[in-house]
């Protein structure tokens, strides 16, 4: 057997010492509940990695590739990168950690012994998420530069595109086996929508608060065209 199971009430001390699992209530049905909970934890760990890794990668790589592709100034300032790293970890990173079980989780076959937490499929999704998020962030800066916006305005564009793109990554990452383009996106995890709302309100706050936006974050208020670009690229990342 792969593991030994002993009864917690009726089992002997020897059996409990030798077993890997002890049923405290002597009910074999408890094993099913334990397996289900274990699958939820495994899925949620993978979802947290799928959220945090592309977002963290994009925060640094947007600056790197922006400069490599010809921008005269970094698309994001140091304080913007630090802020984005903090706020995404506190809000969006928490969403998938408490994601409830997906439908059909017990219909999946058992994973093989020794399976890695980051497999090929998850690694591919992380890579795609990173590439798309970086491309959207840097692309939005070039787009607004061509439209004649100032450095401060393009930095506002970059930070908001990255932050709202991170929301798009989170919305997609919540579902490991099914599409996010479904009513299930609006159900099951109320913390997700609280996190999205807090994230969005903070972005609006730092973008439009005088003194905070220009003196600390070296950015400026955005107009409707810029928010249209943010929404467009958020949708691209979600897809």
Image: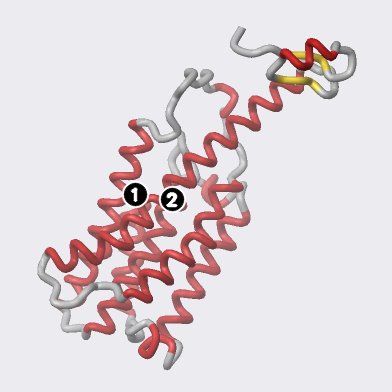
Foreground residue among 129 and 223: 129
The residue most toward the bottom is: 211
Residues at circles 1 and 2 in contact by the CB criterion of under 8 Å: no
SS class, disc 1: loop
Q: For residue 50, which quarter of the picture? A: top left
Give me the disc on residue 51. Answer: 2
Residue under the point 50% across and 75% down: 202
Rendered-image quadrant of the N terminus: top right
Residue under the point 35% across and 85% down: 221
Q: Where is residue 217 in the image (x, y as percent from the top left)?
A: 37, 82
Residue under the point 56% across and 54% down: 94
Residue under the point 34% across and 82% down: 222
SS class, disc 2: helix
Is residue 157 shown above or below 51? below
Foreground residue among 226 and 142: 142
Please name the residue that numbered disc 1 is placed on: 239
Q: Is residue 150 left or right of residue 224?
A: left
The residue most toward the left is: 70
Upstream in the sequence, badge 1 or badge 2?
Answer: 2
Q: Position of residue 163 (x, y in %)?
A: 39, 65
Q: Residues within 10 Å of mark 1 (few under 14, many from 20)?
A: some
């Amino acid at each position: 057997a792969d593991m030994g199971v002993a009864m917690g009430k009726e089992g002997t001390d020897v059996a409990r010492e030798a077993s890997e699992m002890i049923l405290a209530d002597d009910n074999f049905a408890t094993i099913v509940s334990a397996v289900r909970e274990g699958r939820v934890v495994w899925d949620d760990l993978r979802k947290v990695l799928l959220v945090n890794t592309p977002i963290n990668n994009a925060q640094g790589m947007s600056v790197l590739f922006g400069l490599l592709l010809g921008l005269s100034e970094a698309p994001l300032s140091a304080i913007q990168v630090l802020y984005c790293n903090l706020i995404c970890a506190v809000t969006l990173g928490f969403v998938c950690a408490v994601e409830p079980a997906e439908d059909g989780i017990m219909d999946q076959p058992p994973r093989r012994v020794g399976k890695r937490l980051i497999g090929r499929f998850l690694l591919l999704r992380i890579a795609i998420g990173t590439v798309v998020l970086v491309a959207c962030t840097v692309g939005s800066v070039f787009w607004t530069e061509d439209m004649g916006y100032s450095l401060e305005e393009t930095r506002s564009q970059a930070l908001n595109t990255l932050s709202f793109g991170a929301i798009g990554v989170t919305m997609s990452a919540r579902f490991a086996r099914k599409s996010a383009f479904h009513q299930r996106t609006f159900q099951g995890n109320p913390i997700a929508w609280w996190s999205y709302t807090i994230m969005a309100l903070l972005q609006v706050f730092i973008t439009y608060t005088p003194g905070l936006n220009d003196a600390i974050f070296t950015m400026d208020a955005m107009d409707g065209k810029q928010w249209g670009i943010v929404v467009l690229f958020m949708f691209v990342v979600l897809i």
